[in-house]
Amino acid sequence: MKKEKQEKLYELWFRYAFKQLIVDKKMTAAIRPGRRLCPAPKCTNEGDLARIKILKKPGDEEKGLMPIFDDYETIVKIEKIIVKPLKELTAKDLQKCSPDSQTPKLAKYQLSLIYNKEFTDDEIISIVHFKYI
């Protein structure tokens, strides 16, 4: 299978509460809704570089409100992307994610808070594992 060419860096945005975990390189995975493997909207590939940005104030895509970011950024390499339904998540899948998402129940709850919608057990999510470079 031919690898899609990445035109601009994929971005992983994290809430400000997790900035220190990022700075200290203690968080190495992010759970995101949908399929994040290319080809798909908002996608990346294993082996690609990505930019981590810290949200000071989240935006609202539906209302056209852009987020406000902290000055801190770092570049990481995408190591692995796990795509599966929420109902198949395990605590082991989530152990490198943020502390508020390290069990399947917490992950589902946090996704609902962040994206302001209810997530069903059948919804597809991606766990994007990355390495600091």
Image (spheres, grey):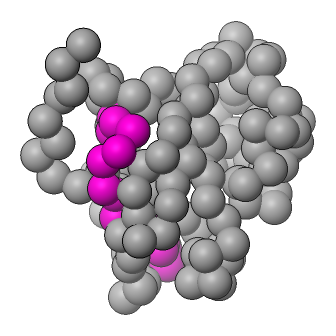
Residue 96: horizontal and vertical position, in percent? 73, 54
| Residue 114 seen in this snapshot | yes
Q: Quadrant of the C terminus?
A: bottom left
Left or right relative to 52: residue 89: right
Q: Against 60, is 125 above or below? A: above
Residue 67 lies in what quarter of the image?
A: bottom left
| Residue 63 seen in this snapshot | no
Say which residue appears at 57% left-offset and 24% top-offset: 83
Foreground residue among 97 and 15: 97
Residue 99: horizontal and vertical position, in percent? 81, 61
The image shows a total of numbered marks equal to: 0
Foreground residue among 58 and 63: 58
In magenta stretch: residue 57:
yes
The part of the chain drawn in magenta is 43-59
In magenta stretch: residue 100:
no
Say which residue appears at 27% left-offset and 22% top-offset: 39
Residue 42: horizontal and vertical position, in percent? 33, 37
Q: Against 119, is 121 above or below? A: above
Say which residue appears at 16% left-offset and 52% top-offset: 8
Left or right relative to 61: residue 112: right
Residue 4 lies in what quarter of the image?
A: top left
Foreground residue among 90 and 101: 90
Say which residue appears at 34% left-offset and 36% top-offset: 45
Left or right relative to 68: residue 125: right
Residue 43: horizontal and vertical position, in percent? 33, 35
Single out the residue that lies furthest toward the bottom.
Answer: 71
Residue 28 lies in what quarter of the image?
A: bottom right
Foreground residue among 38 and 117: 38
Left or right relative to 41: residue 89: right
Q: Quadrant of the N terminus?
A: top left
